[in-house]
Amino acid sequence: MSTSTVPADNSFQLSQLWRDARYRSYTIQIIALVVALSVVMMLIGNAVENLEALGKDFNFGFLFEPAGYDIGQRLVEYTSASGHWKAALVGLLNTLLVAFLACLAATVIGVFVGVLRLSNNWVISRLMAVYIEGVRNVPLLLQILAWYAVFIHVFPKPKQAEPLLGGALVATNRGFYIPGFTYEGAYLAVVAVFLASIAGIFIFRSWAKKRQEETGQILPVGLYSLGLLIVPTAIVYFIAGMPIGLEFPTLKGFNYVGGTKAGTPLIALWFALSIYSAAFVAEIVRAGIMAISKGQTEAAYALGLRPQRTMSLVVLPQSLRIIIPPMISNYLNITKNSSLAIAVGYMDLTGTLGGITLNQTGREMECMLLLMATYLVISLTISAVMNYYNESVKLKGR
């Protein structure tokens, strides 16, 4: 039975906003939007009034005042005389760094563990099950503190540490030291060619995939991609006179100088986030693989495909459509869980903007709003990128 009432002369009447099905949904949405905006404005007004009662105003001028504190792990130049905005930027980059490293490591470990969890070898399968159930049922904060304690007490002091890999790695209780890059001359040309090579790899892989779908011929994509990445960059590197070099860490006094340092808090946080999140990734991968019919594997074997090719060409491409949606939530959780970094003294966004800056300036409202907005933008960006990739691997009708 229709609820639509259309006047005989087709003229619009006010009653149609709630009686006519064509307009009712718009009316409800507009009312809901007005109510939501009213609540937000009421909360903002109440917050402003309370700040005025405390003798405070609402502004972000404090961001340009000297921060007055040091940050050990940083990706950009920063001193204690820099503004609070620079400290927040350093914290943001530190957050993105540990989140990226943890997402990458958790994916690799999780896929490996998830596949081994389905192994026919009873011992391997049980060991993976013990790892998954043991790790994901222990609070992450405890694991972060445990890994931090391991790195502090197990690894030697800088003066007692022995360089590894020909001096390319020094593992100490203050952090890991690896060679750093030095730049001179036409190094920008080398960097530009390297970036162009990466773009060329994506274009080539897309072309190779399309060619395979049309002709059935498989190209050695991995080998060609490696050559495309190395050869052009190497040619320009030597023509430009080798403008990019390596600086190895050297012991001076009681610590190592030179190269690149990954502090103990960063390493501990990275390990804890990776190993904890990999347990969830493993279950996601296992569920995705098990969702694929065994008939797909049997058909691939009947066509003469080996188990490794069957997994990479038949099973995993189909399971990706099941794996990716929950993986988005997992990557978001990794990024947000990185805010526990303050427990081991790693100065991320929460430790700088939401910690020291907030306590020094007393601008709790402004700092919290900036903090929430930044995490929201990061999360929405991750969701957008992963949803785009999810759309690209969906089955498309011909």
Image (tube, grey):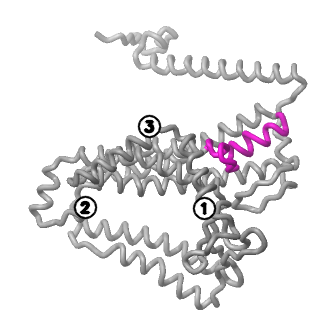
What residue is drawn where x is 63% and y is 55%?
152
Find numbered disc 2 in the image and state the secondary structure of the residue it sits on.
helix
Q: Is residue 12 above or below residue 372?
A: above
Q: Is residue 357 above or below residue 216?
A: above
Report the front residue among 137 and 4: 137
Report the front residue among 196 and 27: 196
Expressed as whole percent of the image width and height from the top left, the position of residue 175 reads 65, 62
Q: Is residue 339 above or below residue 307?
A: above
What residue is drawn where x is 43% and y is 10%?
19
Q: Is residue 358 shown in magenta?
A: yes
Residue 137 - label: 3
What residue is drawn where x is 36% and y is 77%?
223
Residue behind mark 2: 313
Q: Amino acid at mark 1?
A: Phe
The N terminus: image quadrant:
top left
Q: Give the residues in magenta.
A: 339-362
Residue behind mark 1: 155
